[in-house]
Image (cartoon, rainbow, N blue to C red):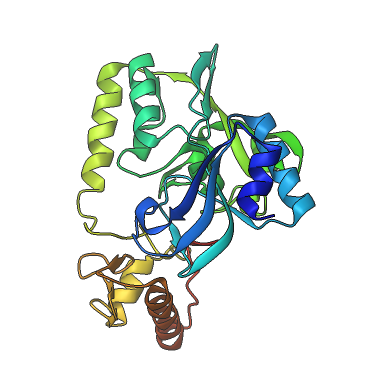
Amino acid sequence: MDIQSLIQKRFPTLRAEKNFSFAEHTTIGCGGVAALALSPADTRETAELLAFFEEEGIARCFLGAGANVLPADGFFSGAVVRFSRMKTLRTDKNLLYAGAGVTGGELLRFVKEKRIGGFEAFTGIPFTVGGATAMNAGVADRHFSDVIERVVCVRGGEAYHFTRSQCAFGDKDSIFLKGFAVTGVYFRAEPSSTAEIAQKTAYYRARRAHLPGGRSMGCTFVNPKGLSAGKLIEDCGLKGLRVGGAVVSEEHANFIINRGATSREINELIQTVKDTVQYKTGILLREEIRRIP
């Protein structure tokens, strides 16, 4: 029995999409095709699905908004798990709950309407709540870990509630990149005003105005402590370096732009940049992006 038949037999109401295109669902716009993409409805169904994958030996990967990821070329015979049906947004006293599938736009509109502050720094960043939590998304002075109280997640067939201290948040890192699936997040709901939210939103939007357009993964490398990865790459003379359709941006050297590239070409360019920067400066850049599947 093939993977689709196995899953449909066990989960007859699960939303499934065959021949899922990574190129169409990621910001970098490349990669191959997965046999299936599956969208569980809630934490319980996610736990049951992941337990089933383990029992049957079915490979899987998680995908949110498709930013900061580089999908592989070719065919993935496993399943992509998406959280697009988990869209709950609600406030409860001093907490805000958001389902993993809530997009950045949806979250920011909601907090603006409810006059909740602290989220303005995430303006203009493509994300879903689940993916941004796993990656600890943000900017230099503000990350998701700064507003999170606890996280609902799944590993295997078990659901967990992790406090912020249990999440092992780091610079573009967390425990959720080690096999856990985020299904929902409780944030601090700090009161603010419409005027203050608008002012801070405009400030952070202006800070992002210089970032390059085109298809990219966002920043490719984490900034080394006290340094700028983009400046290091630029100082090594790598702006405009090209491998096939993959190009180091002329506007911001920490961005790789897809101009008709395959994932293999982007991988090759990433490795060349890392090797060159390490050879010339002694600094080994750490990748911010995640490879899937």
The residue furthest bottom is 279
Residue in the image at 37% along x and 39% along y: 122
Tell me the quarter of the picture where residue 154 sits: top right
* Left or right, 175 with reference to 35: right
Q: Which of 202 and 137 is in front in this view?
A: 137
Residue 276 percent coordinates (x, y): 40, 85
Query: Would residue 60 be visible to someone looking at this image?
Result: yes
The residue furthest front is 1
Q: Which of 37 and 233 is in front in this view?
A: 37
Q: Nearer the viewer, residue 175 or 158?
A: 158
Residue in the image at 53% along x and 56% along y: 35
Query: Would residue 289 be visible to someone looking at this image?
Result: no
Q: How many labels does the image show?
A: 0
On screen, 33 above or below 241? above
Residue in the image at 43% along x and 75% along y: 267
* Left or right, 48 with reference to 148: right
* Left or right, 139 with reference to 82: left
Residue 104 percent coordinates (x, y): 38, 36
The residue furthest top is 93
Tell me the quarter of the picture where residue 47 sits: top right
On screen, 283 above or below 93? below
* Rendered-image quadrant of the N terminus: bottom right
Residue in the image at 22% along x and 34% along y: 202
* Left or right, 134 with reference to 137: right
Q: Nearer the viewer, residue 196 or 101?
A: 101
Residue 221 percent coordinates (x, y): 43, 65
* Rendered-image quadrant of the C terminus: bottom right
Residue 251 percent coordinates (x, y): 20, 65
